[in-house]
Image: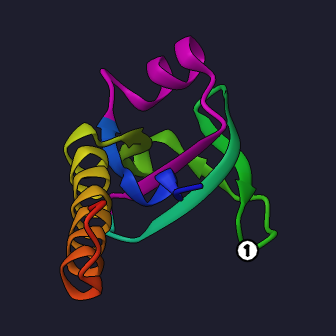
Amino acid sequence: MLQLTGCQTWRVAGPTPAAYINARNPDDILVRRTDSSSVRLLNPSVDGDTLRGFAVTGSKPAIPLADVQSISVRRTSMGRTLGLVGAVAAGVALSVLLSCTSSGTDYC
């Protein structure tokens, strides 16, 4: 089966990081800090004025919301997904066409 995770992109979520996390309860976010660094958090939560979660590195960071520039969540990109499916279909069709023309059989 195709790896459709390759057809996903990070999209900025809002209106604010705290509002999005409280409303949507995402499993996985990418936090961009005001110093331009970023950290990926699993199971994020807002505790008062602090963003908490489990970093993919194994740590448990506590990031003040004042230090959060934005958060992003993974979304499926329909354009990339359709492009991948189209490329695979074109490859299969080209393979069949080339094998039929080189084999000289009448059933192709």
> Residue 56 or 16: which is nearer the viewer?
56
Q: What amino acid is found at the position of numbered circle 1 in the picture?
A: Thr
Residue 41 horizontal side relative to residue 13, left or right: right
> Residue 3 or 49: which is nearer the viewer?
3
Q: Residues within 10 Å of mark 1 (few under 14, many from 20)?
A: few
Residue that badge 1 annotates? 57
Task: State the quadrant of the C terminus.
Answer: bottom left
Q: Which residues are magenta?
A: 13-34
Task: State the quadrant of the N terminus.
Answer: bottom right
Q: Residue at x 39, y 44 (%)?
A: 72
In magenta stretch: residue 72? no
In magenta stretch: residue 15? yes
- Of all residues, the one furthest to the top in this rendering is 23
> Taking 67 as reference, is 87 above or below it?
below
Q: Position of residue 90 (x, y in %)?
A: 21, 62
Q: Position of residue 21 (x, y in %)?
A: 55, 25
Element marked by disc 1: loop
Residue 60 horizontal side relative to residue 56, left or right: right
Q: What is the quadrant of residue 46 in the picture?
A: top right
> Residue 22 or 5: which is nearer the viewer?
5
Q: Residue at x 72, y 47 (%)?
A: 53
